[in-house]
Image (tube, rainbow, N blue to C red):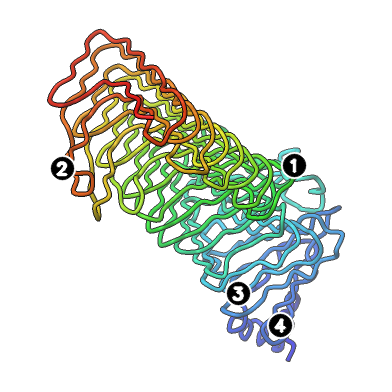
Amino acid sequence: MKLKICQFGLSTVCLSAIAIAPAVAQIVPDRTLPVNSTVTVSEKTSSIEGGTRAGGNLFHSFQEFSVLTGNTAFFNNSVDIQNIFTRVTGESISNIDGTLKANGTANLFLLNPHGIIFGKNAALNIGGSFVASTANAIQFGNGREFGINVGGQNSPLLLVSVPLGLQYGQNPGTIINRSTAGLAVRSGNSLILAGGDVRADGGKLLAPGGRVELGAFTGAETVGLLFGNNVSLNPISAIARADVSLTNGAEVNARAGGGGNIAVSAGNFSMSGGSTLRAGIAAGSGAAGALAGNIDVNATGAIALDGDGTFLSNAVLENATGTGGDVNLTANSLTATNGVQIYAGTRGQADAGSVNMNVSNAASFDGAKTFSSGAYSRVESAGRGQGGSVNLTAGSLSVTNGAVLQASTFGRGNAGSVNINVRETAIFDGTTIDDNVVFSSGIYNRVETAKSAVGEGGSINIAAGSLFVTGGAVITASTGAQGNAGNLTVIVRDNIILDGAGPLSPSLGFSQSSGLFSSVKETAVGEGGNIRISTRSLSVTNSALVIARCFG
């Protein structure tokens, strides 16, 4: 059965079509374009044709736009169309629980200021990039726009250029993704959700070798659009931000043979419940000269990461070749708790990237579950390449209850450095014991005790106002295999306090002393590093230590 929604006249046939169509697809054109959109329904597919063309741009406008479970909205465009712009001028949220499809390599833009929800069955079948936004309009040159204000000077007939930005209203709607099938674009393209609040609730967002971007904005501002190798947002720093959250095992993945960027622009950014950001070079992929993309999270407020299995990973996987990318976090405050990992590493023939954290005020890492909460750069046992660094600049720093900052090598390659610059106080405190596994809070730079480990340890460099290392926490540079340990340099403006030891470990049979350590282990072939301390006052009490030792 085919059913066509007419946009002229008021015949009984047309009204019947409009009445029946919502039960199938809920896609209703609004008659606001010079050439209006038409919708023909056949079985579970709504074929969208017509619309107003201007050069390589095609414009559609709808009163309602939703796709029911198992249905398809098919934009049956000419294959030479470059961009499809779709606006929703009514007051209903767009609920997408089926497939959005288009011909050729056209980029598809979906604009609904009232909100967009992608259900568990939502999927994409398009050849270009996908942008979903709750902005009010898409801006073009010469002050023209295509948005919910459909009168005046907004005729799309003259909008033949590439769009310049997204114009927001005062209260943009929320975008929610629950697609367990996964919203996915083809290799090298962009997948952008630009809302008010943006929530990934157990869903997947996939752009192999392309770009996944989550932007949350509020207030009557314009967010720029850039068209290069793919589409990206270009928000000015002053624009007000809303919140981005990933919960219930949500996954954002851009990992492929190269490229693959993830970008977040938010007021507050949170991850929990085993949610993940994954970039890097996939197993068996890449080539000489292949570059992984970066993970960039920019929050004007807080970054809050929580839960065992929650991680941000930029990794070069097994049998992959190239160069790893970085994890870059910028925020007013940062918390990582209960086993969260922020990771850049290599298991392939490649150098690892770095973890870079720039925090205006407090940075806090706390707790251990399967893994210690913390930031890591590692050359894994199968890796053949140089490790990256862990770099943190913050107002204050707290690393407690088994959390760590670590750079290490298990493979053939040098470990990177750990560089900490804290304006006020840096606190390292506590040891956690879980299933006889001891998690001591602290900073570690190690050539690990492993047959596969061959390389030099990196340095640890700490600059702070005051430094506390207590309750069994450690700052240690060590080697347990073939390679020299790195140096440990501590420059503190005021006081260094090293105090106490952790609880008795059932597996080790002793308590871990707090302190600063440079160690060459029994299994090592190499030299220890130096410990250099500069401070106004140094206190070492209650079994704490400052020690350079060699057992190898």
Q: Looking at the image, which residue is at 39% across and 17% down?
A: 530
Q: Looking at the image, which residue is at 34% across and 29% down?
A: 551
Q: Which mark is residue 504?
A: 2
Q: Which mark is residue 41?
A: 4
Which mark is nearer the camera, 4 or 2? Answer: 2
For label 3, the SS is loop
Q: Say what amino acid the circle numbered 3 marks.
A: Gly
Q: Say what amino acid the circle numbered 2 marks.
A: Leu
- 54 to 259, vertically: above or below: below
For label 2, the SS is strand
Look at the numbered discs 2 and 1 and tell me whether their residues touch, using CB distance below 8 Å: no
Q: Which mark is residue 140?
A: none
Viewer-nearest residue: 74 or 159: 74
Q: Earlier in the sequence, mark 3 or mark 2?
A: 3
Which mark is nearer the camera, 4 or 1? Answer: 1
Q: Is residue 95 left or right of residue 321?
A: left
Q: Where in the figure is residue 244, as x and y percent of width and height?
A: 46, 49
Residues at marks 4 and 1, CA–CA distance in whole angstroms: 49 Å
Q: Which mark is residue 98?
A: 3
Q: Where in the figure is residue 131, as x and y percent of width and height?
A: 64, 54
Q: Say what amino acid the circle numbered 1 marks.
A: Ala
Q: Looking at the image, which residue is at 57% across and 55% down?
A: 253
Mark 1 lies on residue: 288
Residues at marks 3 and 4, CA–CA distance in whole angstroms: 14 Å
Q: Earlier in the sequence, mark 4 or mark 2?
A: 4
The quadrant where residue 314 appears: top right
Which mark is nearer the camera, 3 or 4? Answer: 3
Look at the numbered discs 4 and 1 and tell me whether their residues touch, using CB distance below 8 Å: no
Q: Is residue 167 left or right of residue 532?
A: right
Residues at marks 2 and 1, CA–CA distance in whole angstroms: 49 Å
Q: Is residue 406 left or right of residue 27?
A: left
